[in-house]
């Protein structure tokens, strides 16, 4: 019996190989191979983005050689990632600008069409600025701009409760690059009188192509006496990530109007990974659908009414998107 | 388990025993290759880990309980890149790994011969770990475990004032919770949704799985030197080397050590 026990213990302890796993080598070929593998194992959106990753890798692998410069290696990596056109896919390299796969973010296309300073100087009174937000009054209405989705959102319920009945909340999500959507999920309860599904998501949870968690249904919970004021939400092509999930929450509510431009279309949750040369990349790991099954990844969430600034508000002398929001807010 | 602990307490109290409380502090190192976060092996160090302990030693039975806090900072190469839309020049972050270890072991002396004795026993250990892996920002993850291990201890007293102890333990079963494969899946996001650290801890503890030694290994070797300063006071060094391995979710390999200077009061 003793011998059997000893054999069992030795077997249990010894059948697993011990020791650290081999690390990817730090040379250009290994870096490209590792980038390919990281995305192959974790990126959840090749199908939605319409990219054959294996072919992209095969084409670019041929461009890599030992001893190539960091700049050349950077060019190969970005050439692999650019076709994804994904606002979440980024590459951070020493001394360089953060590189975005998404062309709008990378080239700053239309970035000047929204100007926070112009709004503060020309539209708002009783302006209050805090970490991650600024707000003020436009006539009887409350204007709030959040720069990201995070803890500052927890102040929103307090602001909502002090709004007069005929006042409208103009919630500006333009140039909001995201954050943690659960803060918005908490804050927006105060606009919601019934528990409602707002989006579904599932996560890549293994290297094989079809390895995903089950779909997870996210709900916006209700409060007993929700704030009934109308809400006008402004979005643009720089509304990204958690800000897009927040837009999905808001569009599920009955008293909300979406205005402006289509959002960026990078909705998934994202993770960081490092490459063997310590460069850092970001990889979206989720697929997200609306409760009715619509996919906005890569396309963006369209507003109910498209209103665009043809050029910078400073040059126009006005912000046409905000003007339209005020016009709608003033309608009975 | 509760019955066993109660029995151990009764055994301890029933004999004429020495009790010792100790305060320990010193540097710790950790090499960690956690493929949930990175294929690279990362190293971290702290000059000050801090622990307190209570020991109870009878003729045949010995028990020790220890609480140790280790807050390690990664030795990763950080670099500066440009955040064109937000903060301008931005530096990447090193990792921070925080561990709270509660360790209890009980030993029974099976052989005594002159200056040495050999004891067999068991250990239970609980570890709460918050991992802040450094990239462009820090990314939160967790590792919690509760282990039950057999132990083997060899104690040697070359002179009345000197004592060396060599202790080895390796888990039989463990209850392990780790960050998910994708680091950031829906369940993980929901676990943190309250934005309350205690609730997050509670939720992540709920992700634990019971596993055997084929799925999770924690092996620990400890060399302890104790010097008697007087009737009540002792000082000494405790060197602990541990190795951890699992493939639950994604492979993890970790090799760490603590080198603590201790001061003890015996009563």
Image (tube, coloured by chain):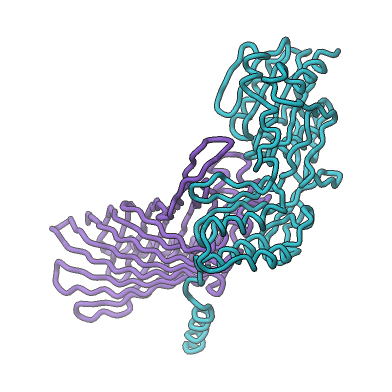
Chain colours: A cyan, B purple
Locate residue B222 relative to residue A172 in the image: left or right: left
Residue sitting at x 14%, y 72%? B159
**Toward which corner of the image does residue A318 lie, by quadrant?**
top right
Q: Nearer the viewer, residue B242 or A83?
A: A83
Q: Can residue B98 be seen in this view?
A: no
Vertically, is B249 above or below A227?
Answer: below
Residue A40 image offset from top left, x and y in percent: 68, 63
Vertically, is A310 above or below B233?
Answer: above
Q: Nearer the viewer, residue B254 or A114?
A: A114
* Image quarter of the C terminus of chain B: bottom left
Residue sitting at x 69%, y 24%? A312
Locate residue B35 relative to residue A103 in the image: left or right: left
Residue sitting at x 82%, y 36%? A302
Vertically, is A301 above or below B240?
Answer: above
Q: Can residue B230 be seen in this view?
A: yes
Vertically, is A100 above or below A234?
Answer: below
How many dots with numbers? 0
Locate residue B170 relative to residue B195 in the image: left or right: left
Residue B52 image offset from top left, x and y in percent: 32, 53
Residue B96 image offset from top left, x and y in percent: 44, 50
Residue sitting at x 81%, y 43%? A290
């Amino acid at each position: 019996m003793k011998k059997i026990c000893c054999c069992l213990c030795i077997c249990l302890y010894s059948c697993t190989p011990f020791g650290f796993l081999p690390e990817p080598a730090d040379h250009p070929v290994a870096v490209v191979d590792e980038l390919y593998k990281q995305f192959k194992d974790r990126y959840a959106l090749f199908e939605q983005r319409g990219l054959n990753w294996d072919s992209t890798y095969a084409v670019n692998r041929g461009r890599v050689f030992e001893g190539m410069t960091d700049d050349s290696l950077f060019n190969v990596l970005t050439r692999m990632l650019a076709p994804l056109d994904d606002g979440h896919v980024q590459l951070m390299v020493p001394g360089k600008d953060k590189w975005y796969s998404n062309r709008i973010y990378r080239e700053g296309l239309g970035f000047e069409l929204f100007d926070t300073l112009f709004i503060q100087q020309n539209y708002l009174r009783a302006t209050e600025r805090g970490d991650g937000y600024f707000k003020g009054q436009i006539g009887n209405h409350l204007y709030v701009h959040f720069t990201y989705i995070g803890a500052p959102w927890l102040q929103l319920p307090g602001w909502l409760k002090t709004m007069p009945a005929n006042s409208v909340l103009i919630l500006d999500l333009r140039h909001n690059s995201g954050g943690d959507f659960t803060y918005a999920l908490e804050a927006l309860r105060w606009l919601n009188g019934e528990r409602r599904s707002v989006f579904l998501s599932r996560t890549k949870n293994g290297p094989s192509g079809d390895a995903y968690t089950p779909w997870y249904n996210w709900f916006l919970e209700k409060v007993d006496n929700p704030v009934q004021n109308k809400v006008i939400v402004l979005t643009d092509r720089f509304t990204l990530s958690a800000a897009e999930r927040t837009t999905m929450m808001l569009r599920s509510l009955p008293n909300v109007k979406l205005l402006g431009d289509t959002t960026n279309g990078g909705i998934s949750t994202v993770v960081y990974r490092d490459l063997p040369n310590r460069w850092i990349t970001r990889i979206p790991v989720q697929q997200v659908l609306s409760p009715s099954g619509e996919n906005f990844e890569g396309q963006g969430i369209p507003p109910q009414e498209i209103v665009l600034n043809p050029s910078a508000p400073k040059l126009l002398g006005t912000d046409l998107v905000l003007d339209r929001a005020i016009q709608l807010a003033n309608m009975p | 388990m509760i019955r066993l602990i109660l029995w151990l307490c009764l055994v301890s109290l029933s004999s004429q025993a020495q009790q010792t409380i100790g305060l320990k502090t010193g540097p710790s190192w950790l090499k960690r290759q956690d493929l949930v976060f990175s294929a690279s092996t990362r190293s971290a160090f702290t000059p000050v880990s801090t622990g307190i302990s209570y020991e109870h030693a009878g003729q045949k039975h010995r028990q020790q309980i220890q609480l140790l806090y280790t807050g390690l900072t990664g030795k990763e190469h950080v670099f500066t890149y440009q955040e064109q839309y937000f903060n301008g020049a931005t530096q990447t972050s090193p990792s921070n790994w925080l561990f709270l270890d509660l360790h209890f072991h009980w030993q029974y002396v099976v052989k005594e011969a002159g200056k040495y004795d050999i004891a067999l026993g068991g250990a239970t250990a609980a570890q709460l770990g918050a991992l802040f892996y450094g990239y462009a920002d820090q990314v939160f993850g967790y590792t919690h475990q509760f282990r039950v291990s057999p132990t083997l201890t060899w104690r040697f007293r070359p002179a009345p004032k000197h004592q060396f102890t060599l202790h080895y333990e390796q888990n039989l079963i463990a209850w392990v919770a780790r960050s998910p494969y994708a680091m950031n899946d829906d369940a993980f996001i929901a676990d943190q949704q309250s934005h309350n650290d205690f609730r997050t801890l509670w939720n992540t503890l709920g992700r634990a799985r019971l596993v055997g030694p084929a799925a999770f290994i924690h092996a620990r070797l400890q060399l302890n030197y104790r010097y008697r300063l007087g009737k009540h006071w002792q000082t000494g060094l405790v060197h602990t080397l541990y190795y951890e391995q699992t493939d639950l979710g994604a492979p993890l390999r970790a090799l760490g050590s603590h080198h603590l200077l201790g001061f003890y009061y015996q009563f």
